Amino acid sequence: MDTTQCRLWPWLVPILLLTAWLGARGLDADAIWYDEWASYYNAGGAHYGPLAPGAIIERIAADNYTQTPAYYFVLAGWGAFAGWTTFAVRALSLLIGLAATAWTYRLGRDLIAPGAGLLAAAAMGTSAFFVEYLHEARPYTLYALLVVVNVWLYWRLVFFPPLSPALSPTRGERESARRRGAFLLTLSAALALYTHYFTIFVFIALGLYHLLFAPKTRAWWRAPVAMGAGGLLFVPWLGVLLSAVSTNLRTSDPSMALGTAELIGMLGYGLGNGIAAPLTIIVWGAAVFERGRAVRFVGFLALGVAGMVVALNALLPIVINLRYLMALLPLTALLFGAGAARSARLHRLAPTLILAIWTGAGVWHSLTPAFSDTLFTERHQALFRRGLPLDRLADALHEQAQTGDVLALHTQLIAGPIMTSFQHYMYDVPVKYLVTSGDNVFEGYAGQARSFLGDAPRVWLAAERHNVADPPPNVMLAQFEQVLAEDGYVYCRRALDLDTLHLDLYAAAPVCCGPPEDIESAALARFGDSVTLTHLSATVTVEAADSTLAVLSAWSGGDKVPPYTYSVALHVFDADGKFVSQADFGLPVEAYGCYRARIPLDGLAPGVYTLTGTVYNWRDGTPLPAEALHAPVEPGEQRHQVILNRFTITITTIEEIP
């Protein structure tokens, strides 16, 4: 084995550790956004599945045909093993990215030299562009890995370098290795095409290089046949691809795509790690003057892929983000490695200095948002802005929300993209929700808000926060707060206070904000051994169409009985003890909770009426024994019943008895 290789490869370990640290920092740092939600959905992860392989293909072809299925198969298997938490799902991208970094070293070592391979791996692993996708549940690190693998397989198939000068393979060993290499190239090519459509440009560039520069030996045909066979395996998906292209041409907004100058500038900024362009140009330029077939090969591929994509985008504007060109990252990293290694001829410390500048820039840009914001252009951030902490919002509601609560989220984001990730986190949160977006109140919004509130005893109000000196007015939020005030809701507390979002709790009465300090002192009645009524207010309302008895009650101890087993019955009896009306609702399952009920009173004759309360098992009707503890609650005629209130109906009005 080459002594230089033995001396250098252990340095790959700290490179991988640094890459792992940079990527791991973001695994659970923020909520998933729209594109990551699509990964969950396509793979049948979390509550969107599980899905059989055929069902994954059908879902992608029907609902997300701009995607290809390979990554989602991998993700489905990974999720079945590691789980579907945000951390676990994103960790797959990190592990694949580490493999891509390590294989970049192998590619650079085999094509150029061990030193160039090590520098290329360092450039790859500390690229802020690459780090961005090490903690995102998307196929881009797999895309990069497969580009490296395919280029490596092609090179070994065509040129088959011996393992070492002392171990040159025999003709039979070489032939057997080439057959294996051709088979692996076929599978790898198909997998790459099924991972990202833009890998086709890599294979076109490889084909052109092979046609123009590869040695025309008897085995010349092996590589194009192997890649062609991989392309044939992609044929079953061509219908989906053509459908995606056709639909995008009809419906896409060309203004969302990057212009030619913008795309070229983005290539230099993203692939150059956001550092001064002169350094990047000098290093890449040094690689151009490096003698050797391998460097020319890599440069040809990089320029070919970039040129084809820029030309295509000029004709059909489809590139909206640099990530589509992830194939260029390992290629330019190899050029960086070759150029930095060549700089050692000028001074032995030159590669170290160049690498220090590159690594420092990569680490800095990975730790600050400016680089990511530049790559994810302003017009795209307005549509898909990431960073709204919906996961933190859901966690707060999980801890504090009660059955019957409602949530209103006010954001100035476009509602469509944010709704997917919002619904993802709200899947098992027991609240009804309303999401409003934009700044302008539309006609009838107050009525919509009031209809949404209904009889909710508690309202959670979440609002996006702008950290600017003069934030734009959120008129719809102000309108919603006005509706809360008009409907008698009182402010309880701020439950979540973040830089980008705050969450406030409002309640129909102060007693619903939280449990009293002394439950026993506040107890009005007890049902069974654990369920306690701590508050009750009954208000008679007369409206044009009907009249109702609105009852607000607070309950303690529901968490000490089997959940979703007991219900509360509020019965109205006339002066003769005859049942006339009722309302039933499920006993709150939390330790403390409020409930609003409305009992219809239409058509009742004038007279005195009594409101009673009972807690019963809704499955078989068995009631719990009831005990009146404090006035105004009184014992009822039956052991399971208490009298909660009395009111009188006159000829013209309905009045509560003082």
Image: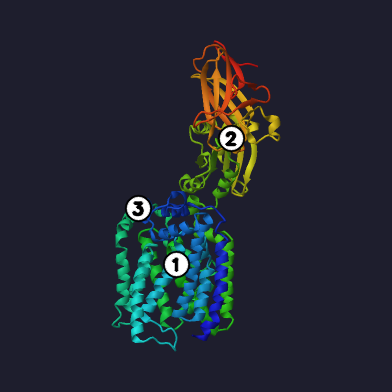
To which residue does mark 1 refer?
A: 144
User: Which numbered disc, 2 or 3, marks the residue that appears first in the sequence?
Assistant: 3
Residue that sits furthest to the bottom in the current view: 166
For residue 615, the mark is: none
- Residue 627 at x, y percent in the picture: 64, 26
Q: Foreground mark, 1 or 2?
A: 2
User: Which numbered disc, 1 or 3, marks the residue that appears first in the sequence?
Assistant: 3
- What is the secondary structure assignment of the residue under circle 2? strand
Name the one closer to the observer, 573 or 322: 573
Name the one closer to the observer, 578 or 457: 578
Residue at the (47%, 73%) spot, across then down? 104
Which quadrant is the C terminus positioned in? top right
- Residue 96 at x, y percent in the picture: 48, 65
- What is the secondary structure assignment of the residue under circle 3? helix
The correct choice, above or below, for 400 with respect to 511 in the image is below
**283 sits left or right of 229 in the view:** right
Q: Three-letter amino acid code at disc 2?
A: Arg
To which residue does mark 2 refer?
A: 458
- What is the secondary structure assignment of the residue under circle 1? helix
Q: Three-letter amino acid code at disc 3?
A: Glu
For residue 58, the mark is: 3
The correct choice, above or below, for 264 with respect to 171 in the image is above
Q: CA distance from mark 1 to mark 2?
A: 49 Å
Q: Three-letter amino acid code at disc 1?
A: Ala
Name the one closer to the observer, 94 or 344: 94
